[in-house]
Amino acid sequence: VQLQASGGGSVQVGGSLILSCVAYGFSLNFYAIGWFRQAPGKEREVVSFISSQGGSTWYADSVKGRFTISRDNAKDTVYLQMSSLKPGDTAVYYCAADWAASQVPSPAHEYDIWGQGTQVTVSS
């Protein structure tokens, strides 16, 4: 049972990336997914959230209008489309799964399964 985040890389300011979070060994159908990031020397922060069936989404103010979260439960995959990237978006990005989430977004301690991170670096 694991989540695998991928799609990170190095881009220039204004560039785009699409992160993927794939579930292995279990179905994402009943899990809400949160995307988090942690920059060096900073605390982890939630940047986006999507409910189990995709009916509810949430974005941090810092990424609103630039990031789009979506999911394909048939593929057990959640995506984070990131555009107009800024140096401040540089961080390790993690996805996490919350069973039967009741809040939007779920508090960090509610998540049951965490993926390994994928590095996103935005340079000017």
Image (cartoon, rainbow, N blue to C red):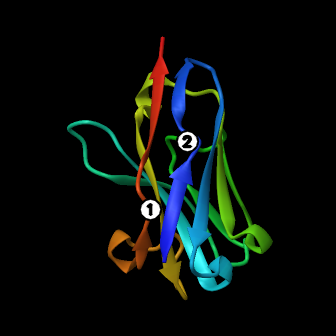
Q: Amino acid at mark 1?
A: Gly
Q: Looking at the image, is 101 positioned above or below residue 57?
A: below
Q: Position of residue 44 (x, y in %)?
A: 31, 52
Furthest-top residue in view? Answer: 124
Left or right side of 110 for 11: right
Q: Name the mark nearer the viewer: 1 or 2.
A: 1
Residue drawn at x 66%, y 29% as measured from the top left? 16
Q: Looking at the image, is 5 positioned above or below residue 114?
A: above
Residues under numbered marks 1 and 2 in contact, where contact means CB atoms less than 8 Å apart: no
Mark 1, residue position? 115
Give the Cα separation between the discs numbered 1 and 2: 21 Å
Q: Looking at the image, is 3 positioned above or below residue 18?
A: below
Residue drawn at x 62%, y 52% as measured from the top left? 20
Q: Amino acid at mark 2?
A: Val
Q: Position of residue 12 (x, y in %)?
A: 56, 16
Q: Looking at the image, is 11 positioned above or below residue 19?
A: above
- Of labels 1 and 2, earlier in sequence is 2
Furthest-left residue in view? Answer: 41
Circle 1 residues within 10 Å: few <14, some 14–19, many ≥20: some
Furthest-bottom residue in view? Answer: 100
Residue drawn at x 74%, y 73% as measured from the top left? 73
Residue drawn at x 42%, y 31% as measured from the top left? 90
Per the image, label 1 sits on a secondary structure element best described as loop
Per the image, label 2 sits on a secondary structure element best described as loop
Left or right side of 65 for 72: right
Left or right side of 67 for 97: left
Residue 63: image tag: 2
